[in-house]
Image (spheres, rainbow, N blue to C red):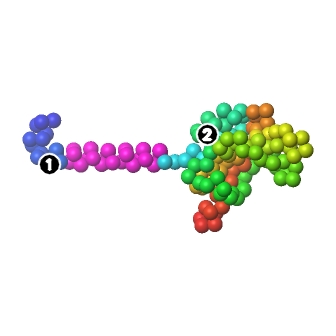
Amino acid sequence: MQRIMKRHPRARLWLLIIATLIALASVAILCFLGSASPINLAAFERIELGMTRDDVMKAIGARPGNYNVSPKEQFVLGEHRGTIVFLVTDYEEIERETAVYDIVSRKTGKPVARLWKWANEENAIFVITEDDKVIGKTHSFVLSTVATG
């Protein structure tokens, strides 16, 4: 290596430039991969009816919550599977913890299912469980994204 450096005085400069470019490219790739939100259509597709809540959290890679979006944000339905409809006149949602709701029967006052919500600035995933098993799932788009995008 030293012989190469003596014969080619610019070799050290080129090695430094190449090493710098590799380092910058590595940082850019890590930033890009690190900033990709786990709340997306691919995560929705990984969720299967019958999965447990823990399986869903593993499939999404995050706990339920509102990530970089207001909890009051409105969504446009994209795709759904399984049971998702609970009539507002018959049921109400009571928030147990952030982005986790009991779906409670207005007649009996008892929870009949649970709604789990994952939302970011572009996507939302809603999962309904009954006896800790997924009975329905919905992928939605944030309304402001649809309106501007």
Pointer 1: what residue? Answer: 10
Pick out the residue farthest to the bottom.
148
The magenta segment: 14-34
Closest to the camera, between mark 1 and mark 2, is 2
Q: Amino acid type of disc 1?
A: Arg
Closest to the observer, 34 or 29: 34
Residues at discs 1 and 2 in contact (Cβ within 8 Å): no
Residue 149 inside the magenta-drawn segment = no
Closest to the observer, 97 or 65: 97
Pointer 2: what residue? Answer: 63
Mark 2 crowd level (few <14, some 14–19, many ≥20, 10 Å Cα): some
Q: Amino acid type of disc 2?
A: Arg
Q: In the visual, does 94 lie left or right of 107?
A: left
Q: In the visual, does 75 lie left or right of 148?
A: right
Residue 20 inside the magenta-drawn segment = yes
Q: Residue at x 27, y 47 (%)?
A: 20
Distance (Cα) linking label 1 and label 2? 53 Å
